[in-house]
Structure formats: C-alpha cells, structure tokens
Image (spheres, rainbow, N blue to C red):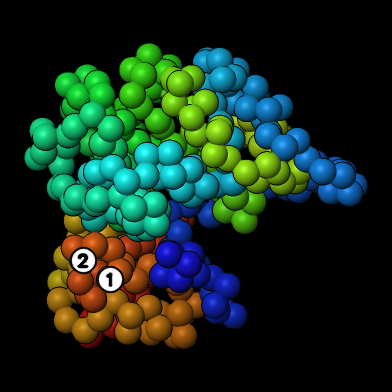
C-alpha cells in the first residue's frame, strides 16, 4: 500500500501537532544532526552492499551473534523479504493490523487467513506463517509474552513473524532477541524509526535463528540501506541511553486522554501502549481529520482503511500534556 498510511504530513502545509504517527515526536536530535553533518561527504561513495558494520553493532547491543541480525530499509523491507521467502503458503494475520503484512503476502501469492487472536486457530501447518504486531497497530494491545511463547512452541514447523516495532512504547514484556534466536521458528521485527524517532531515514532490523536470517539474506537487494542511515544507526546504537522512551509516563497520559475523549461520547479502545484507537458516534474520521488539520493544525490518523474497522475510526498517539490538551479542546468543539 503506497497511499493510506499514517503520518501523511507531507500532504499538508500547516501541521503544528502530529498525532497521526505512533512515534513520540520530542526526541532531541541535535547531536545526531551534528554527527551526520560531519559525515555527509561519505555519500559520494557506495555504502556496504550489506550493512554488516551496523549489524555487528546491533548484535552486540542485543546480545546475539551478527548472523542473527539483518539491518533493513525500515521494517517494511523486512516484511516484504519475509513474504518473498515464504511465498505461496498460508499466512495467518491477526487483524486489524498494519496493512503491509497482507499487502506483502498478497504480492507473493500467499493464501491469507484472518485471525483475531493466537488462541483462535490451532491449525497452523508446517510452512505456514503467522503475523503478529505486538504491540499492535492500530489498537495498541499487547499479546502476553507467555501466550506468544506457548503458541510458538506448540507449532515448531510454523514460522512466526512478530513485529515488535512499538515495544519501546509499552511496559509489557515482549520477546527478546535471544529468545527469538533460541526458538528457531521466530523472526522479530524492530524499527529504529520508532525507537529513535527517525522515520525519514528508514531503518529497521530483523532478529532470528541463523537458518531463517540466512534465507532472508538470499533475497535481499544490495545497498538497500544507504550510507547516512548506516551512520545514523551506528550513532544511535552507541547513544541509545539518550533516547529512552518513558513508556510508563506515556501510558498514564494515554489513560488520561482516553478518559477525557470517552467523556465526550467518543468510544475509546483499551490499549497497552502510547496509541489510542477511537470511534466516533457519528460522522466520519475523514471529516474529523480535515476539520482538525484545517482549523487547528492538528493531524490524526484516519483508521478507516484497517481491516475490520469503519469510516468512524481514528487513531492518535499521545504526545505532551500541552499538545494533548489542544487536541481535547478541538475534539470538544467538534462534538458540540
């Protein structure tokens, strides 16, 4: 899917507060900018065909071997690589969720099956793939780590793709890189975009057992991760402590915002992360989006194109208290 994602800031001229992305928008990037400015001359040469230097740095940080990590051009490249590797099989996707899983599987001829939870379908076969976003986009819900492990261990010949791109934004425990390597039939997706607030650079990585990562490597394109992204990744791995997400604080703020929105008559869904899925009682999310962006410079995510949701659904990710209060004020005017 090219169009229809969140964070479509590029379409608008006067957005002051961006709630449409699931990223916290207030990281201090000044040191990163200065670091990259010094390295701009490096763009006059080709980067590594495979970003091995970055993969070694990530592996050291994660406590696994370099062969267990693949750095990618955002988590989305990893999604399409995985779908290509397991093309033609049955792909079980927990919905509603990020559309690229289904799009990638459809592109590579998979037979897609929608499930609502891991416990719903115990008919996973050898060679099937199971796709789980955890925490999930757009609901923010976390499938308990114990349930995930139980299902993985019960189906050793099924490949589980666990997208943990939003794991920095929850206080709930999710699978570690070491656990994924040990389980053998798991690929974990992570997004430096979300962890460090750098969506414009497109940088992610996959962790798993070497047999699976080797299979993915056989399909990857050379130079898919550019030199600036590699340099940024190396810097951020070394300075990860400067980018700690206050997941507990954001969860408390989400609860506060959810209570205020619910009091207006807008339905809110239970979440375990910084994002909040909402449903209008009437009119459409598309209308609300235009009202907010044109009247207040506020951008939200129209969530109507997620499978199973309606034209009344929208999603936000909480930001600062002051910014969230501006959203609440604007929503109150809309609901009058």
Q: Quadrant of residue 200?
A: bottom right
In the picture shown, does residue 3 fall above or below 230? below
User: Looking at the image, which residue is at 41% across and 70% down?
Assistant: 4
Along the line of sight, which residue is nearer the eye, 146 or 324? 146
Residues at circles 1 and 2 in contact by the CB criterion of under 8 Å = yes
Q: Earlier in the sequence, mark 1 or mark 2?
A: 1
Q: Count the marks: how many? A: 2
Residue 125 coordinates in the image, percent (x, y): 19, 32
Q: Which residue is mark 1?
A: 304
Q: Which residue is mark 2?
A: 309
Residue 181 coordinates in the image, percent (x, y): 42, 18
Along the line of sight, which residue is nearer the eye, 45 or 146? 45
Per the image, label 2 sits on a secondary structure element best described as loop
Along the line of sight, which residue is nearer the eye, 273 or 309? 309
**Quadrant of the image for the N terminus?**
bottom left
User: Looking at the image, which residue is at 26% across and 36% down?
Assistant: 128
User: Looking at the image, which residue is at 23% across and 76% down?
Assistant: 311
User: Looking at the image, which residue is at 30% across and 69% down?
Assistant: 305
Along the line of sight, which residue is nearer the eye, 150 or 301? 150
Give the Cα distance between marks 1 and 2. 6 Å
Per the image, label 1 sits on a secondary structure element best described as loop
Q: In the picture provided, is 11 more to the left or to the right than 262? A: right
Residue 319 coordinates in the image, percent (x, y): 44, 56
CA neighbours of label 1 inside 10 A, class few (<14), some (14 to 19), many (20+)? some
Indicate which disc residue 45 carries. none
Res. 303 in view: yes
Q: In the picture provided, is 123 more to the left or to the right than 185? A: left
CA neighbours of label 2 inside 10 A, class few (<14), some (14 to 19), many (20+)? some
In the picture shown, does residue 141 fall above or below 106? above
Residue 221 coordinates in the image, percent (x, y): 62, 44
């Amino acid at each position: 899917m090219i169009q229809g994602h969140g964070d479509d800031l590029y379409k608008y001229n006067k957005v002051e507060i961006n709630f449409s992305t699931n990223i916290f928008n207030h990281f201090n990037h000044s040191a990163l900018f200065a670091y990259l400015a010094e390295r701009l001359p490096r763009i006059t040469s080709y980067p590594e065909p495979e970003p091995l230097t970055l993969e070694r740095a990530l592996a050291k940080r994660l406590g696994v071997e370099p062969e267990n990590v693949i750095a990618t051009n955002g988590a989305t490249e990893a999604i399409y690589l995985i779908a290509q590797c397991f093309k033609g099989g049955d792909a079980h996707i927990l919905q509603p969720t990020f559309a690229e899983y289904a799009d990638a599987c459809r592109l590579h001829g998979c037979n897609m099956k929608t499930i609502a939870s891991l416990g719903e379908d115990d008919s996973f076969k050898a060679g099937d793939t199971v796709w789980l976003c955890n925490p999930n986009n757009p609901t923010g819900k976390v499938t308990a780590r114990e349930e995930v492990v139980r299902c993985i261990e019960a189906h050793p010949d099924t490949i589980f793709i666990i997208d943990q791109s939003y794991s920095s934004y929850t206080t709930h425990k999710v699978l570690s890189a070491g656990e994924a390597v040990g389980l053998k039939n798991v690929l974990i997706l992570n997004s430096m975009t979300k962890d460090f607030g750098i969506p414009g650079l497109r940088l992610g990585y996959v962790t798993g057992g070497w047999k699976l990562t080797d299979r993915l490597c056989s399909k990857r394109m050379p130079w898919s991760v550019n030199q600036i992204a590699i340099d940024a990744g190396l810097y951020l791995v070394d300075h990860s402590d400067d980018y700690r997400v206050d997941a507990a604080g954001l969860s408390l703020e989400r609860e506060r915002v959810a209570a205020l929105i619910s009091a207006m008559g807008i339905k809110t869904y239970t979440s375990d992360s910084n994002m909040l899925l909402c449903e209008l009682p009437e009119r459409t999310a598309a209308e609300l989006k235009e009202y907010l962006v044109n009247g207040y410079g506020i951008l939200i995510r129209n969530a109507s194109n997620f499978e199973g949701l309606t034209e009344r659904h929208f999603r936000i990710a909480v930001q600062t208290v002051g910014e969230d209060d501006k959203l609440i004020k604007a929503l109150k005017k809309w609901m009058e």
